[in-house]
Amino acid sequence: ADVAGGIDRNSAYTVGLQVLTAHPTIKAIAGSNDDVGLGLVKAAQQQGTLAHMAIAGHGGSCTGLQSILQGQMGFTVLIPGHSVGAASVDAAIALLQGKTVQATQDIPALGIDTATAKGILAGSIPNPSNIDVLTQLKPAAAGCPSS
């Protein structure tokens, strides 16, 4: 299920409870971002269904990655902010120089699940060359300390 109506952790929790109550045998829920995914995790924990379903987020936030490392949220699409910013700046500079810019910009992204995250942290899975996942996993493993 793609839960409509959840836009942040609290609203996703509320909507998640409604969906899980109406559909107690649901197998998976996808959130529009990691914060929504975390609200869905909380709802599934409350309903006692987390162990029997997959919950996905999107974005690769520190708290989302922390939840994945803890085996709660099952998956996120990691979108590194640096790559998005760099592509935007490069396109803006090219446009200011009168150059043609492709309408679509490719931004590297990577699907991360618990096994992949733990493997990258342990060194048994290589850190992807186009996205420095390890740098983003370290603070998640340390509890997402404030900077």
Image: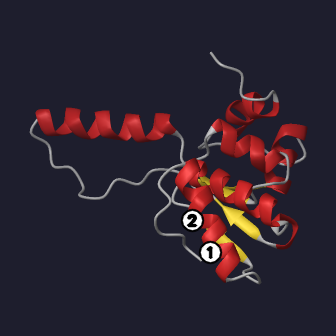
Query: Circle 2 sits in a helix, a strand or a loop, which is it?
Result: helix
Amino acid type, residue under disc 1 in the picture: Val
Q: Secondary structure at mark 1?
A: helix
Q: Is residue 69 above or below residue 25?
A: above
Name the foreground residue: 85 vs 2: 2
Q: Mark 2 and mark 1 in contact (Cβ < 8 Å)?
A: yes
Three-letter amino acid code at disc 2?
Val
Question: Where in the figure is residue 90, as x and y percent of width and height?
Answer: 30, 36
Residue with the mark numbered 2: 15
Who's the residue at 79% across and 72% down the image? 53
Image quadrant holding the C terminus, namely top right
129 left or right, relative to 115: left
Give how far across and how far down residue 30 sits, in percent. 60, 67
Identity of the residue drawn at 75% across and 34% down: 140
Q: Is residue 136 left or right of residue 89?
A: right
Disc 1 and disc 2: Cα gap in Å? 6 Å
**Residue 66, image quadrant:** top right
Q: Residues within 10 Å of mark 1 (few under 14, many from 20)?
A: some
Residue 109: percent from left, percent from top: 55, 53
Rendered image quadrant of residue 47: bottom right
The answer to whether residue 48 is visible is yes
Disc on res. 19: 1
Q: Is residue 120 left or right of residue 65?
A: right
The image's colouring method is secondary structure
